[in-house]
Image (cartoon, rainbow, N blue to C red):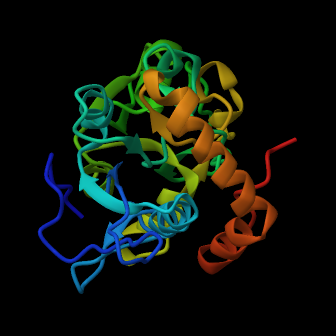
Amino acid sequence: MRRRSALALPVALALAGTAGAQAPQRLRIGFAVGYAPFSEIGTDGQLKGFEIDVAQALCARLGQQCAPVILEFDGLIPALQSRKIDAIMASMSITPERQQVVAFSSPYYYSPARLVMRGDPRADVSPAGLKGKRIGVERGTIHERFLAEQFKGIQLMRYATQDQAFLDLKSGRLDATLVDAVIAQFGFLNHADGRGFGFVGPDFAKDQRYYGKGIGVGLRKADAATLGQRIDEALAALRGNGTLKTLNDRYFSFDLITPPR
């Protein structure tokens, strides 16, 4: 699915917060869509997915109205810094590099990062084994930086969206793509286009130098002590009352919300 840039969707995306006679304050949240089951636009034109539902629950807890803004992934932080949005919920990893410019909430989920390719799942995916291979990533992601620094001998192919990388993988223009495992499973491997492909190699997200400590809500540093604290309290409440687990179980048959050990 293609992403739209810098504009709120021109459809009735009422990710409503607390109802009342007086309209609640709007919280402009930046999303990157096209990533089932995290965030996508359904056939009815509405946003749907795990992160969309978490955002809705979060806004309800905060007593605010979610105002979704759809951006390409690499435009999210600039939009946050220029005050076009107030927060980011787009499967953004909490990494030391990003923490230099963006504040984060506590994690609301955790996701492995895997190579998807055709062939032997036991293939050598070390830097030497992948030398000269065409490996696709979505531009602006941690996957891009990880491969650029740790797999210098590959041909690193950058894409505006992960869907474009999947298309080139299927057509043979790529040898592999590095992607969040859940996105690969639901957005590619579970479909006809993904037949003959599979996960190869380890979970690269275990390298916390790049992948950090999980997925959090991105915020301006100036808002960390105010909005950030309120979001942390709301996430703790949603975790404590079972809402996050209910949302996890709505979309996944496995646990993404418990910190890895």
Residue 5 image offset from top left, x and y in percent: 14, 48
In this rendering, is residue 186 above or below 221? below
Residue 259 image offset from top left, x and y in percent: 79, 46
Residue 251 quadrant:
bottom right
Q: Nearer the viewer, residue 84 or 246?
A: 84
Residue lying furthest bottom = 44
Residue 69 image offset from top left, x and y in percent: 25, 53
Residue 3 quadrant:
bottom left
Q: Is residue 199 left or right of residue 164?
A: right
Query: In which quadrant is the C terminus drawn?
Result: top right
Residue 127 image offset from top left, x and y in percent: 55, 20
Residue located at (64% from left, 35% from top): 205
Q: Is residue 248 something that shows in the picture?
A: yes
Q: Nearer the viewer, residue 191 or 85?
A: 85
Residue located at (64% from left, 28% from top): 212
Residue located at (42% from left, 43% from top): 177
Q: Is residue 83 left or right of residue 110?
A: left
Q: Nearer the viewer, residue 97 or 8?
A: 8
In this rendering, is residue 15 above or below 220? below
Query: In which quadrant is the N terminus drawn?
Result: bottom left
Residue located at (44% from left, 65% from top): 52
